[in-house]
Image: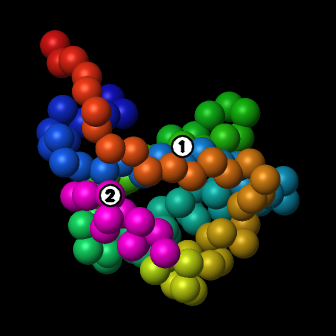
């Protein structure tokens, strides 16, 4: 399930949709996604990260933060991290959609 039933109403969600450059093979893509865990989890407010791939080569990266301020602060700080820089250099930046979301409603079973 993409949205955890354990998420709090105050949590912020970072959703990134992207593709890697054509010359980056799937095994390298998987390694790069796993290596990014080391960068993301060190930031204040980090709660969890899940990522998904599709047949068309697109990835969805779903990160839960304790609040949107810390999510935005981490995104800014991540730009100066060398491991994150190596990751971003392999992305096709024209395909990236990066957004932060705050919960406004929903329903649970």
Element carrying mark 2: helix
Locate residue 42, reporting x and y percent: 31, 77
- Is the C terminus in the top left, top right, bottom left or bottom right quadrant? top left
Q: Which residue is mark 2?
A: 68
Identify the image quadrant of residue 67.
bottom left
Q: Is residue 99 above or below residue 58?
A: below
Disc 1 crowd, CA 10 A, few/some/many (<14, 14-19, 20+)? some
Q: Is residue 3 above or below residue 78?
A: above
- Judge left or right: residue 25 versus residue 17: right
Q: Residue at x 41, y 66 (%)?
A: 72
- Judge left or right: residue 29 versus residue 100: right
Element carrying mark 1: strand
Q: Residue at x 39, y 45 (%)?
A: 101
Locate residue 75, reporting x and y percent: 47, 69
Q: Is residue 68 magenta?
A: yes
Q: Which residue is mark 1?
A: 60
Q: Main secondary structure of the magenta part?
A: helix
- In the image, the segment drawn in magenta is 66-76
- Judge left or right: residue 103 versus residue 86: left
- Which residue appears farthest toward the top when viewing the image? 109
């Amino acid at each position: 399930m993409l949205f955890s039933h354990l998420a709090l109403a105050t949590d912020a969600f970072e959703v990134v949709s992207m593709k890697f450059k054509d010359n980056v093979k799937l095994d390298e893509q998987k390694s790069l996604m796993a290596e990014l865990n080391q960068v993301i989890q060190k930031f204040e407010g980090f709660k969890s990260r899940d990522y998904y791939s599709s047949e068309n080569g697109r990835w969805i990266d779903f990160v839960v933060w304790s609040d949107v301020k810390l999510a935005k602060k981490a995104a800014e700080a991540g730009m100066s991290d060398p491991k994150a820089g190596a990751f971003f250099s392999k992305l096709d930046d024209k395909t990236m959609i990066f957004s932060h979301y705050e919960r406004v409603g929903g329903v649970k079973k």
